[in-house]
Image (spheres, rainbow, N blue to C red):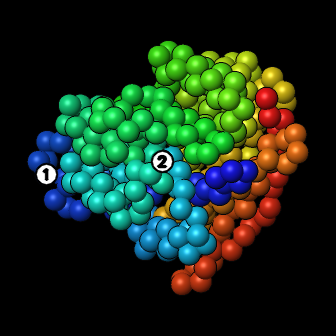
Amino acid sequence: MSDTLDFAHFSDLHLPMRLADHWPVGAMLTKRLFSMLSWQGSRRFIHDPAITRHLVDDIHDKGIDLLAVTGDLINLSLEGEYVRAAHWLAQTGSPHNLMLVPGNHDLLRDTPKTRAGLTLWNAYMRGSDPQERPTQWPVLWRKGRAAFIGISTAMQSPVGQCGGRIGPAQLAGLQTMLEDAARQNLCRVVLIHHPPLPSLGPTRGLDDADAFAAIINACGAELIVHGHIHTTSMDSLAGPAGPVPVIGVASASARPGRKSKPSQWHHYRICRDGALWRIELRPMLWQGNDRPYAPNGHYIFEAPPR
């Protein structure tokens, strides 16, 4: 990339479970039980892996080989789910062109086994550092004149809640990365699963959304993208030079219905336009069956480079 970069953002795949995932039965006598009942009751009729395959094919057909995935690949954080999601990642992209941050369903229970399962995805969560090391959040992917900063908000939450947390160490790292990227005059894109909006509250949003907003207010960013709420949304947070767009995307696997928005992916183009960073967004909406995804609007965001 010199002056232009295209990337695709999608989220919330919720790859289907198998009966064997639920063994031993004792593993289900936790918060997983309620999530499993939710899956069997309605969510399995919403999330269709065939739609996700169609979405990925559509992205590749359009020649976009940089993918940003903002979590919830799986449902109950069970061993078999991690293995199949790792296989899906390997089929979909490489660690050089696929960037991943985890969601709350990817760490529904925080145990040594689930932490070990999550390490199967490490290659896609290490950023641009080629060293073989455990993933340490936040991470940074340098892509030409763009800096993608990944934050993990995955945490075990109480029954009936699905919020997340960034934590003091990540917040400090985020501030440092934003400041360093600003000094290099890079276009800064933050990848996060939960919407970082204080108005959502901690049960669905972030425990420390106010602290995140304060860092954006002080340091700025050019774009923040997230998943989690299974609908396309457009919000903003205050930055030092004006509003910073905060854009959510619908679930990658969702059939349209009374309780779900149809599958979408977002096509972003980053470029320099004179003295401005120019970011174009085309939401791509699933049309059903084997028809290609179609544009559902065209939005332009501009921010001055430093």
Residue at 29% over, 60% down: 87
Q: Which residue is mark 1?
A: 23
Question: Amino acid type of disc 2?
Answer: Met
Residue positioned most to the left: 24
* Side (left or right) of 130 relative to 227: left
What residue is rendered at 13% in x and 51% in y? 23
Residue, x 58% and y 19% (percent of image)? 176
Reply above or below: 167 against 28. Answer: above
Q: Looking at the picture, how far across and down is residue 63, in whole percent?
A: 58, 70
Q: CA distance from mark 1 to mark 2?
A: 31 Å
Q: Is residue 140 visible?
A: yes
Residue sitting farthest toward the bottom: 290
Residue 296 appears left or right of 197: right
Q: Pick whichever, 77 or 306, lies toward us.
A: 306
State the mark number for residue 99: 2
Q: Is residue 99 above or below residue 46?
A: above
Q: Quadrant of the C terminus?
A: top right
User: Are dots 1 and 2 in contact, CB under 8 Å?
Assistant: no
Q: Secondary structure at mark 2?
A: strand
Badge nearest the viewer, 1 or 2: 2
Q: Which mark is residue 127?
A: none
Query: Tag 2: Cα neighbours inside 10 Å, few (<14), some, or many (≥20)?
Result: many
Secondary element at image label 1: loop
The residue sitting at the front extreme is 2
**Amino acid marked by disc 1:** Trp
Q: How many marks?
A: 2
Q: Is residue 81 visible?
A: no
